[in-house]
Amino acid sequence: MDIKVNVREAPGECYVVDLSGEIDVYTSPKVKDAIGALIDRGVYHLVINLEKVRYIDSTGLGVLIGGLKRVREHGGSVNLVCTNPQIKKIFDITGLVKIFGIFESEDAAMKALV
Amino acid sequence: MNPAVEEALPEVVELRIPSRPEWVALARLAAATVANRVHFSIEEIEDVKLAIAEACTAVIQHEPHSEFVQLTCEALGDGLRIRVRDSGRQGVYSADVQRMNLDEARIAGLGIFLIRTLMDEVSYDVHPQHGTDLLMVKRLGPRSD
């Protein structure tokens, strides 16, 4: 079980966070730290790429919700890239599709920021 | 083994993990293996994995007195019955909520919400001396193939 986190700068003062692996109660602190560090640096527009995430549970959802709340306090936004039907299903049944922008491609997620 | 004897044997898998985050993946793996034996679809197996993980996570996060999480997975003729027990004292699904602010409570409530949504039957009892006893059943869905 593992999670890999890669942060990269993208055009337009936004950052992309690539996540790969499984996000659960053991690995979610690493994701929280990465997102929190960006926000602490004043980055308020994020694309979080979940294309290589095989599994996410409520602790992972909680980390994403927490990040979204923090950036919104600064007028920012978080868009997600999600193509895995099982991951998308979890956002659907929890109603989180209504608070996150969820896109099929990174390009679409980037264009929809702000 | 004699097929008739094999048929009559209940298929029950028990697993006790330490009540710590690094062991939840093992619980998911065990659940997936048993669910596969019951011939759930891939999507249903993912549902079972998530429900078990949420149950374990709830113990780890909200029951500091529990040293372990005990899982019992029983293959039924038409599905899977899963029991999740801990050795805590305060009750996993309600104890902390009153101390949380609204946002924390909403996030904490996602776990039990997911369990209730993904499984067909869910019930739990809280025993002051023996912790929380969660029972979940997932039935086989209709097959299209």
Image (spheres, rainbow, N blue to C red):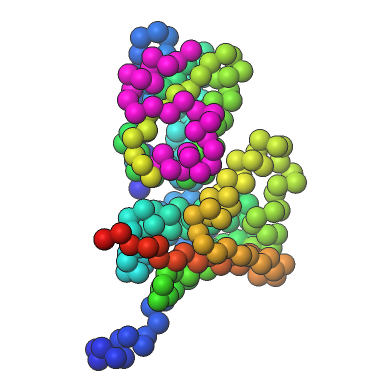
Q: Which of A96 and B60 is in front in this view?
A: A96
Quarter of the figure with residue A50? top left
Q: Position of residue A112 (x, y in %)?
A: 42, 16
Asked if the stretch drawn in magenta spans residue A109, the answer is: yes
- Judge whether A53 appears above or below A75 on screen: below
Front in this rendered view, residue B104 or B106: B106
For residue A43, say whether it is visible: no
How many numbered discs sit on the rendered protein?
Answer: 0
| Figure quadrant of residue A14 | top left
Residue B113 place in picture, x, y as percent: 58, 50
Question: Residue at image x 36%, y 88%?
Answer: B8
Q: In this view, does B58 lie to the left or right of B91?
A: left
User: Residue placed at 50% from the left, 38% from the top?
Assistant: A61
Q: Is residue B123 left or right of residue B52?
A: right
User: In terms of depth relative to the viewer, which is nearer, B117 or A66?
Assistant: B117
Task: Give the image location of residue A83, x and y in percent.
Answer: 33, 35
Q: Quadrant of the N terminus of chain B?
A: bottom left
Range of residues picked out in magenta: A87-114
Q: In which quarter of the image is the C terminus of chain B?
A: bottom left
> At 69% from the left edge and 54% from the top edge, which residue is drawn?
B94
Q: Which residue is drawn at 43% across and 54% down?
A: B47
